[in-house]
Image (spheres, rainbow, N blue to C red):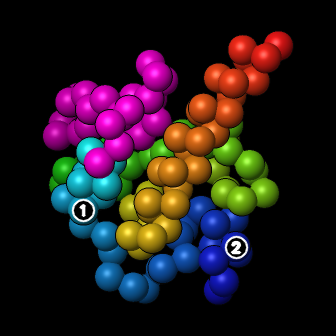
Amino acid sequence: MCKEEAKKSNTGWGKGVMDLSYERKEAILDSYSGLEKHEVSNDRVNYKYRGKILALQFSKSTGNGYINATYLNKLDYKDDKKAWIKIKDYTEDEFESLVIDAIKSFEDMDSNKLGS
């Protein structure tokens, strides 16, 4: 499966490769100064960017969680009915690319609102 097909399948294209640990995903998210970490129930964490939730229900026990795909190009990523992308099976490169794309999509949306 190529990267583009897997992005659309919502499973991550590194399926079968060692899953990225919660700690590494957390370190990637924490490396972006614009993201604010919020502890929520059941050992889960949300990350907000400019007051909007970017990462939802990021679980310390499973490494799963969701990235907000509301403003992402739907041709590049497959999201669920509520515009969230499941991140459990993403490789490090895939996860970091997804986080960067999500942040950029939030910035682009804010820029579009200012230009309106």
Residue 39 visible, this angle: yes
Q: Quadrant of the N terminus?
A: bottom right
Residue at point 44% right, 62% down?
A: 95
Residue found at the very far right of the displayed protein: 116
Q: Is residue 41 magenta?
A: yes
Residues shaded magenta: 31-56
Q: CA distance from mark 2 to mark 1?
A: 23 Å
Location of mark 2 (residue): 4
Within 10 angstroms of label 1, few (less than 14), some, or many (20 or more) residues? few
Which sits in the foreground, 29 or 11? 29
Location of mark 1 (residue): 24
Is disc 2 placed on a helix, strand or loop?
A: helix
Which sits in the foreground, 46 or 115? 115
On screen, residue 80 versus residue 30, left or right, reads: right
By secondary structure, the bulk of the magenta-drawn segment is best described as strand
Residue at point 33% right, 74% down?
A: 19
Q: Quadrant of the C terminus?
A: top right
Within 10 angstroms of label 2, few (less than 14), some, or many (20 or more) residues? some
Residue 85 visible, this angle: no
Residue at point 67% right, 56% down?
A: 78
Q: Position of residue 18 (x, y in %)?
A: 32, 82
Q: Position of residue 73 (x, y in %)?
A: 74, 49
Task: Decide: is 21 above or below 56.
Answer: below
